[in-house]
Image (tube, helix red, strand yellow):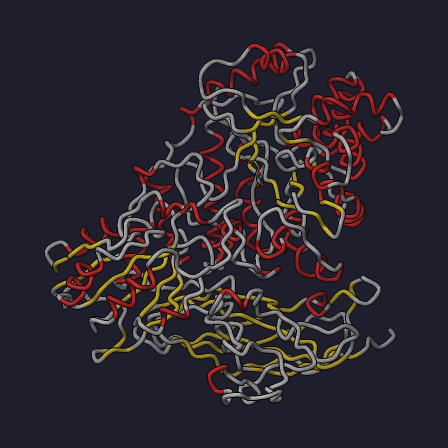
């Protein structure tokens, strides 16, 4: 059996697929139809298939399995489904392949810092190839929830705070997973999740309620799902969360009105784990039977893990509470995806026909992803110039300190079921290779884990720093501190890491902070002590080589923040695309708590929108990221300063590399509708370009804004564009100052 790859298969004719769906549906019993709507967690740990599980497959009571790993077991399950069941319908075999399978890439939030769709697509392609070799044909990714609350553990899995960035990167992931043709043996079905609004969980607690006005839902949370659907994503996963009193899993507005009626989606929706059963826990229903009714009638096609459908749908149909036509629609959605995925033609996998898991080529791609995900937040100048990059030939001694110096498992981050920490290279190993014979290294971890609160190893760390030319501190979060259900109420550095940084910085030795974490951290209390900060998220299996190549200048940092970094936890939510309010804060109106006179009584303080105890700006803004070279933006101009509504707008800017080394800049274009029938965010990202320039090179960048770039959701909840004046900025981050104004005029009647 040869492996059919993307290049060799032809996409199925839509008509042929529909004909096959109708034909098969007509031959199915109600029990077999409901079986297709049931996904079961694999019931073994890699040994034999339990007979009751095999029998359920044989009877057509299972349409999909998740967490089955091992191509032998998967092929055996498929064999029973295809050769021993009455209709031979193959299984969808699902797995959370979130940021790699055996070769672990940076967490999605880190990958988003690359602002590079092509890189992300390639990473997903590799993950798909590795997963498919084990029989997996469906991944529960990309997670395209908008994350604006770093307390939420799952912010690690998202693609940041901005709908445009998350849309482009999420679509790229879908294309990477599904390949050019879904029928190829190395393609896997993608699943955009968690539909919708999960990232707005109250106070950053997982599974908490969300209260999202429809306009914010449509402008912020839905666009990345629409982009995934438009990119051909074949499945979506319902969110656990309660959306304004109607949990997403039972939310007809989401699952049918938006997804089917407005977007024309024709794949299928799977519940999240047990989320149909949980409708009773939410208090929306009083039983599994009512939960089955609510979810089925809302538009959730397949049930993951719980058994409400398999145990109650048949009765609900017999009682004519759930129409048979509804069941047929649900089953048709599932069968359509199975036909499109070529599962009937090619249900089995032969691992020998696939590239080896974790091979050098795949790890090289993970390295590139980690390099481009690194964000240089700070790089102060010392007496001899910028702290970074380090010249290893000019240094005699480096102090290497911190709990993440040599933690190959921690740097992989969350959702790494199928990883192998033995192929994960930590910074220390790479630094030793790089320094070999060029300079001395002294290693003092100082803390056992990032949660360690003991100070007893601090003296050794301080002594090492005192004796060194530079101190590299590898700090952040253990992998367990982010991911599902792993939320934090305080997002400062955990354990005694802040104290360790302060103690090392007190030596006066230049300090470079390398942060590995699953979320933005509140770093205001430490960034003042250090000379440089490199933010690596959880960088994956090639974090070590990537970090060292960035620190030493072999690679020039190009990452840009996909999410705002707050100063302190109390600033959350803080994001760049906020609305102005009637009393926006200004430096003049800001009053700091320590500056308030003693015994001040009912003093009018500022009367604008800020906190007394923290500056009103983030620590680092969305889109921020430094380079070892210098880029200058100039000559921002419009093709026309006045454009009719409905016409595209061309924007030009010159970008110059003024430094002495090549570099990549992510040029970002932001827009503000100055006056509109509903208030608009102070800025919105409308386009971006990754540009590589040689030293001294100048290039004119062109941005083409389509008419819909100027649209917003009006008072009637419909998209609209209004005439008026718009501000446009192009620059290196969301604080860009280079600005032009555009007049949008009413369309002249043709
Ligand atoms: C989890 C997650 C979801 C995941 C699913 C299967 O609870 O919410 O993202 O895909 O269950 O593991």
Toward which corner of the image does residue 358 lie, by quadrant? top left
- In the image, residue 60 sits, relative to residue 634, either above or below, namely above
Quarter residue 14 falls in: top right
- Which residue appears at 46% of the width and 83% of the height? 594
In-image side of 126 versus 383 (left or right): right
**Residue 458's x, y, as percent?**
22, 59
Q: Quadrant of residue 162?
A: bottom right
Identify which residue, 617 or 116, lies in the foreground. 617
Q: Position of residue 578 (x, y in %)?
A: 63, 70
In this view, the residue in front, 256 or 190, is 256
Looking at the image, in which quadrant does ligand 1 appear? Answer: top right
Q: Is residue 543 left or right of residue 739?
A: left
Residue at x 45%, y 66% (from the top left corner): 691
Of 678 and 542, nearer the camera is 678
Which residue occupies the extreme front position in the image? 599
Locate the C terminus and report the quarter of the image it occupies: bottom right
Q: Is residue 89 left or right of residue 374?
A: right
Q: What residue is at 63 percent from the left and 42 percent from the top?
A: 233
Q: How many marks?
A: 0
Taking the image as shown, residue 687 lies to the left or right of residue 426, namely: right
Residue 28 in the image, given as x and y percentages of width and height = 77, 17
Residue 626 vs 95, above or below: the answer is below
């Amino acid at each position: 059996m040869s492996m059919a790859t993307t290049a060799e298969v032809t996409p199925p004719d839509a008509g042929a697929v529909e004909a096959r769906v109708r034909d098969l549906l007509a031959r199915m019993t109600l029990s077999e139809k409901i079986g297709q709507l049931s996904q079961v967690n694999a019931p073994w740990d890699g040994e034999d298939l339990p007979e009751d599980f095999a029998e359920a497959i044989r009877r057509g009571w299972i349409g999909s399995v998740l967490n089955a790993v091992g191509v032998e077991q998967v092929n055996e399950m498929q064999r029973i489904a295809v050769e021993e069941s009455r209709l031979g319908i193959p299984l969808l075999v699902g797995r959370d392949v979130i940021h790699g399978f055996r070769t672990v890439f940076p967490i999605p939030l880190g990958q988003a810092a690359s602002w590079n769709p092509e890189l992300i697509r390639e990473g997903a392609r590799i993950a798909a190839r590795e997963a498919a070799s084990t029989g997996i044909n469906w991944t529960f990714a990309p997670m395209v929830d908008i994350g604006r609350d770093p307390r939420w553990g799952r912010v690690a899995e998202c693609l940041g705070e901005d709908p445009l960035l998350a849309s482009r990167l999420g679509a790229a992931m879908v294309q990477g997973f599904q390949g050019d043709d879904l029928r190829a043996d190395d393609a896997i079905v993608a699943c955009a999740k968690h539909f919708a609004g999960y990232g707005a969980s109250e106070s950053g607690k997982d599974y908490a309620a969300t209260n999202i006005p429809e306009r914010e839902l449509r402008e912020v949370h839905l666009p990345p799902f629409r982009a995934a659907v438009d990119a051909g994503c074949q499945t979506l996963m319902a969110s656990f969360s309660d959306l304004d009193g109607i949990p997403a899993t039972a939310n007809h507005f989401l699952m049918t009105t938006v997804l089917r009626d407005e977007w024309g989606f024709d794949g299928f929706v799977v519940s999240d784990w047990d989320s149909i059963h949980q409708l009773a826990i939410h208090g929306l229903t009083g039983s599994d039977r009512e939960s089955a009714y609510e979810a089925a009638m809302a538009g959730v096609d397949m049930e993951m893990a719980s058994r409400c459908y398999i145990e109650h749908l048949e009765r609900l149909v017999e009682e004519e509470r759930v129409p048979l036509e509804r069941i047929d629609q649900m089953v048709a959605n599932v069968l359509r995806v199975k036909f499109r995925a070529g599962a009937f033609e090619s249900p089995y996998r032969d691992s020998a026909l696939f590239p080896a898991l974790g091979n050098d080529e795949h790890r090289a791609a993970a390295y590139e992803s980690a390099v481009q995900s690194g964000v240089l937040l700070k790089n102060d100048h010392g007496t001899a110039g910028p702290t970074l990059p380090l010249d290893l030939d000019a240094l005699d001694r480096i102090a290497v300190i911190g709990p993440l110096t040599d933690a190959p498992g921690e740097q992989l981050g969350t959702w790494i079921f199928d990883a192998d920490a033995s192929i994960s290279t930590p910074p220390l190993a790479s630094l030793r290779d790089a320094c070999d014979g060029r300079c001395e290294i002294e290693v003092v971890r100082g803390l056992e884990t990032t949660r360690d609160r003991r100070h007893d190893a601090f003296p050794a760390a301080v002594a090492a720093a005192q004796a060194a030319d530079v101190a590299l501190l590898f700090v952040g979060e253990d992998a367990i501190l982010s991911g599902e259900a792993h939320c934090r109420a305080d997002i400062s550095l955990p354990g005694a890491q802040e104290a360790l940084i302060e103690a090392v910085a007190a030596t006066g030795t230049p300090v470079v902070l390398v942060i590995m974490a699953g979320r933005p951290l509140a770093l205001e209390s430490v960034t003042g002590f250090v000379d440089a900060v490199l933010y690596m998220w959880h960088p994956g299996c090639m974090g070590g080589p990537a970090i060292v190549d960035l620190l030493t200048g072999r690679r020039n940092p190009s990452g840009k923040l996909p999410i705002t970094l707050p100063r302190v936890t109390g600033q959350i939510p803080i994001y760049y695309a906020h609305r102005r309010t009637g009393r926006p804060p200004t430096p003049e109106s800001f009053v700091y708590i320590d500056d308030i006179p003693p015994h001040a009584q009912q003093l009018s303080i500022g009367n604008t929108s800020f906190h007394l105890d923290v500056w009103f700006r983030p620590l680092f803004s969305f889109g921020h990221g430094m380079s070892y070279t210098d880029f200058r933006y100039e000559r921002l101009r419009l093709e026309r300063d006045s454009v009719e509504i409905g016409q595209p707008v061309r924007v030009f800017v010159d970008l110059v590399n003024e430094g002495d080394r090549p570099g990549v800049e992510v040029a970002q274009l932001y827009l503000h509708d100055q006056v509109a029938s509903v208030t608009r965010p102070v800025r919105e990202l409308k386009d971006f370009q990754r540009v590589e320039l040689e030293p001294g090179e100048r290039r004119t960048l062109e941005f083409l804004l389509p008419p819909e770039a100027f649209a917003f959701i009006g008072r009637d909840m419909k998209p609209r564009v209004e005439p008026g004046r718009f501000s446009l900025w192009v620059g290196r981050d969301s604080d860009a100052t280079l600005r032009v104004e555009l007049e949008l005029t009413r369309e002249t009647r043709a």
